[in-house]
Amino acid sequence: MSSSSVNKTAHPFDKARLEALLSHRFFYAPAFEIYNGVAGLYDYGPAGSALQANIIAEWRKHFIIEDSMLELDTTIMTPAPVFETSGHVARFADWMVKDTKTGDVLRADHLVKNVLEVRLAGDKEARGEAAKPAEDDKKKKKKNVKKVAVRLADDLVKEYEVILARLDNYGGPELGELCRKHDIRNPDTDNEVSEPQEFNLMFTSSIGPTGKVPGYLRPETAQGHFLNFSRLLDFNNGRVPFASAQIGRSFRNEISPRAGLLRVREFTMAEIEHFVDPLNKNHSKFGEVRDTVLTLLDRDVQAAGGTQVVQLSVGEAVDKGVIANETLGYFMARIYTFLLKVGINPERLRFRQHMSNEMAHYATDCWDAEIQNSTGWTECVGCADRAAYDLTVHSKKTGHPLVVKEAIEPPIVTEKDVPVFNKKLLGGTFKRDGQTLQHHLESLAEPELLKVKEELAKGKASVTVDGKTFEVTPELLTIERRTFKQSVREYTPNVIEPSFGLGRILYTLLEHSFWCREQDVDRGVLSLPPLVAPTKVLIVPISAKKEFEPLTNEISAKLRRAGVFSRVDDSSVSIGKRYARNDELGTPYGITVDFASVKNRTVTLRERDTTDQRIGSVEKVIETVTELVEGGIDWAEACQRLPAYDGVQAVD
Amino acid sequence: MSSSSVNKTAHPFDKARLEALLSHRFFYAPAFEIYNGVAGLYDYGPAGSALQANIIAEWRKHFIIEDSMLELDTTIMTPAPVFETSGHVARFADWMVKDTKTGDVLRADHLVKNVLEVRLAGDKEARGEAAKPAEDDKKKKKKNVKKVAVRLADDLVKEYEVILARLDNYGGPELGELCRKHDIRNPDTDNEVSEPQEFNLMFTSSIGPTGKVPGYLRPETAQGHFLNFSRLLDFNNGRVPFASAQIGRSFRNEISPRAGLLRVREFTMAEIEHFVDPLNKNHSKFGEVRDTVLTLLDRDVQAAGGTQVVQLSVGEAVDKGVIANETLGYFMARIYTFLLKVGINPERLRFRQHMSNEMAHYATDCWDAEIQNSTGWTECVGCADRAAYDLTVHSKKTGHPLVVKEAIEPPIVTEKDVPVFNKKLLGGTFKRDGQTLQHHLESLAEPELLKVKEELAKGKASVTVDGKTFEVTPELLTIERRTFKQSVREYTPNVIEPSFGLGRILYTLLEHSFWCREQDVDRGVLSLPPLVAPTKVLIVPISAKKEFEPLTNEISAKLRRAGVFSRVDDSSVSIGKRYARNDELGTPYGITVDFASVKNRTVTLRERDTTDQRIGSVEKVIETVTELVEGGIDWAEACQRLPAYDGVQAVD
């Protein structure tokens, strides 16, 4: 059976099945489960940890190593003044509403979204347009919203659609207004909700034993980069552009997280801060990505209530000004190739530009890489131009200069007319007014200064400052041509920030990888690319008998030496069950060891998606599977090298 | 010059120089430095992050991969009930004292230690025994303790020494008593201090918008393993022993951290929880470590006020009962080989057993891997037997069984005499007392039951329960021989926990690696092993001229393909300065590209410690340096392959 003959869409995507698989195979689970859990906190088990570690390893290679970025590992617990300066204390908040009777807290924008989406679904059903009743039913159940097949007026449908398209652009007062206008209530209780109030999303704590040093858990790793800017610049021998990078935990005290790994209170993120000359945001490697085609949803389309995307090459998008500059474009293209490498479906990936009110307080432009999944389109990577915002505010607050000093070679030489005073005579003649007069003359533009010069050439000049006129003589003042040399340029760099939510990428990847075998809907498979699969090769002795151990250990040791991560499964269930378990774990290859293996040193190699089996000598199979895992060959090529296995072990 | 001729101890260890180097080369720096920092919080820069990442990568290989451990990534923010159950809320605390006038807070045991050590140093000086005045001076200055050369009475010296040896064994009341008895005051102010009070070391926070869900930041990753025990056991197909492992951030709100990376409020740790049958703590791989010789300081020696160590093989130590069991011994040996691999000096490494009062509330035995450094001996890895403590308390609190069910094959068959009642007759005859009688008979030991049987055989038996006598007949009761089969054994596993403070290992490694060149004390070197060095190879074109770029890029790309991490330094300073900078960064090898390289495709290879230079073709040098970095060959062997460089580039 060839790979292309596998029908991965024989059964529609079934979220409940996927969730059962992820829980049962311990990709992740609610944290503190035996204590009944806490919303928005999850633990990764062995499969999830390995998947995450592999995504991180590839991230490090794709971004840090490829562009020689400077890695950092900075502190989570942060004293309050840092986030006061950065603006997070004042503005890093979401709008929440309270159920007016129960006091339950809901996030205002999510409430509006959920209620209107359900009403629109009810409308569709009433019009006989309901597409996927199964999906809708689940949505209804999950959100506790009673969907009723009620037909809405055509203009109301349009109004709801526009609200949903512009949702991220609304503030608290508008959300409150929407709740009143459209009678949006808490779907759990049908009670009215309060006016939206702001809730700051940072977790608070206190540092040290005195109780007098308030701290916050960082909601992003970025400030750790900015505060260390001078040290990083120094490490990079004073040169810009350069990028720092950090992978680490951040915390956001979400109001009411209910979306699994897509909205959590504690998460691992990977952030790059690329520091760049504000006068030159070109990128030296832009040529390498110019032809990468991206799916773009720009802010103008959204502001008009639309969601139509365009396909543009990055080069074209920058040329047309859709993407603001080359550096932003470079990173968007690099983000795109990274996401494809780890297994995201490119047809379910788009870049959406932020609308003006939606943008974080520090950003001047921002594009989100959004990945489509069962809940809709979810931001998984943000790519923002933070301009000079952060470095400027921290520098101003602390007095520590966070600037680049760049030698100008050759120095810029300029000539300028300047007033030159006889200071003694100036003071003697005008007393205190002398200084006022001096400052005035020094601030004059060249044409006016030349007028004074002309008058002086005639013996005397009149200068009026704040309505008071001074008579000055050539003894007291001369206007002279002087040469100035500027050899250093000082500037605050701008920052382009790609910021990755690793848990969101991991979850959407799991959705994109999941399918069920055509012949049996209960046999789920995760078609994870070998690059990120938790285990690359499963070694399966046909039984736990001692006689298989030497060969099993040998294969295991040889794969380890080749850098291929394998696991042995010698549990007592059937081979079929063990393979089914590993299909669920996304293990791409399996090596079976049986009696013939011990006798002839041949083993079979199984491919996960096709369940196709080939046979060959231990050495040849290890060599082939190593190349498969490293991406040097594909399964079709492996089949050229290894004959099909017909169920009877043969001598190679 | 050969490696052996390098004199690394020509200059005495100079902590101030090392600290300047670490700061200047941005291994790490105080976090929030431009905001004047917060004690006990540090950021790792590019060099420190890479060093840490390499230590972690080796840890993963040495422990997780080698023993097929199950990796986890669990949550830091933890709801309060978890740590109430684990005992941390009640007992995870240090004793603090307050300066009675200023209110400054000090950790009680550290205060006692600092003051007594300084008095002993003063005594030594008065006796003319002061060994290292330079070191002592720095200590004095750092701790603000005025050392005075005062001779103490001989028995007071002995008393102080015993206090210091037993320091970790004292609780708050004893520490208060010591302060009063020996007039120990705040050295910063000379004021008296308050009675010691407990201060809980967990950072507190609040989860969600209601303010009603208190949370703690975890002070260790261990609880995340225990709470997921059932899922882990299931993942491991229900079998024990197995180990879970986790690398992650933890937090401890230290009272007054002043020891750099050795005592911090936020840190990365790596923890293993090895779950084992309490009746069998042998380890299947113990044979592999049996002959590893460790330096041990056991609890009896310390309790007697001593610090004498013994050298014992792990096998011998377990046989003699010095180390409690094979699993504990296995991990101590594996910890030892890991620390040596990353570059810790084995002569400055010992395992110290905890004294009974010192042990954490959950531990039954504990050995610390202590590494000697400029502050003394510091715990860097703890290896504790937590027994069944954690699983038992969580299971009891939540009602969720955290146990192993083990099939007994063949089942244990036992025969037993049991009472069999005619229930109807029993109730009819004795009414409510029937049940009392039944319970009594069921709880009887076999000999007594047999007596009843004998009486019944004679027609009737008298049974007395709580002073009341019942007459029973054979119609009402028979004693029968029955067969019982036990096929499942249920038990709570014990846990052996190796727990690594990665920052402490990193810092002591930096101390062990640091030295200054004999000819120039200003030229510091970090002799980090290639395995953990932040950069493996520095590529140095003799100038930033464009003509070197193609070859520099080629070498860089080839090294990347070979998996060797390199950096190019084409900054404008001299080659000597660039190498000196990289000696400070611990970069073991350097490749120089000059005009002859471009012409002849030969480059030189420099070794960091010897500064020895060899020459060869680009291909041969890349091949050689790759093997050097992978540990396949050493520098002596590399010198066999590549001729010495005499300062004139030659055609290979």
Image (tube, coloured by chain):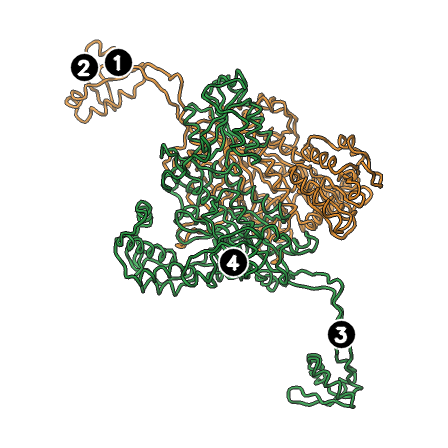
Chain colours: A green, B orange
Tell me: B253 left or right of A491.
left
Pinpoint residue B643: horizontal percent, then vertical percent. 81, 34
Disc 4 residue crowd, few under 14, some 14–19, many 20+, Cα 10 Å: many
> What SS does tag 4 mark?
strand
Q: Locate residue A441: give its quadrant.
A: bottom right
Pinpoint residue A434: horizontal percent, then vertical percent. 72, 84
Give amino acid for label 3.
Answer: Glu
Which residue does the numbered mark 3 point to in the structure image? A415
Q: Could you tell me if residue A307 is visible in this image? A: yes
Marker disc for residue B473: 2
Which residue does the numbered mark 1 point to in the structure image? B480
Question: To which chain does the residue with label 2 belong?
Answer: B
Image quarter where the C terminus of chain B lies is: top right
Depth check: give the residue in front, B568 or A618: A618
Disc 1 residue crowd, few under 14, some 14–19, many 20+, Cα 10 Å: few
Give amino acid for label 4.
Answer: Cys
Distance of mark 1 from mark 4, alpha carbons? 83 Å
Pinpoint residue B40: horizontal percent, then vertical percent. 59, 49
> What SS does tag 3 mark?
strand
Give amino acid for label 2.
Answer: Thr
Which residue does the numbered mark 4 point to in the structure image? A366
Q: Are marks 3 and 1 on the same chain?
A: no
Q: Are marks 1 and 4 on the same chain?
A: no
Q: Earlier in the sequence, mark 3 or mark 4?
A: 4
Compared with residue B557, is residue B333 higher up or lower down, i.e. above or below?
Answer: above
The reply to whether the C-beta atoms of the residues labelled 2 and 4 are less than 8 Å apart is no
Give amino acid for label 1.
Answer: Glu
Q: Locate residue A631: give its quadrant.
A: top right
Distance of mark 3 from mark 4, alpha carbons? 42 Å
Question: To which chain does the residue with label 3 belong?
Answer: A
The reply to whether the C-beta atoms of the residues labelled 3 and 2 are less than 8 Å apart is no
Q: Residue furthest left?
A: B428
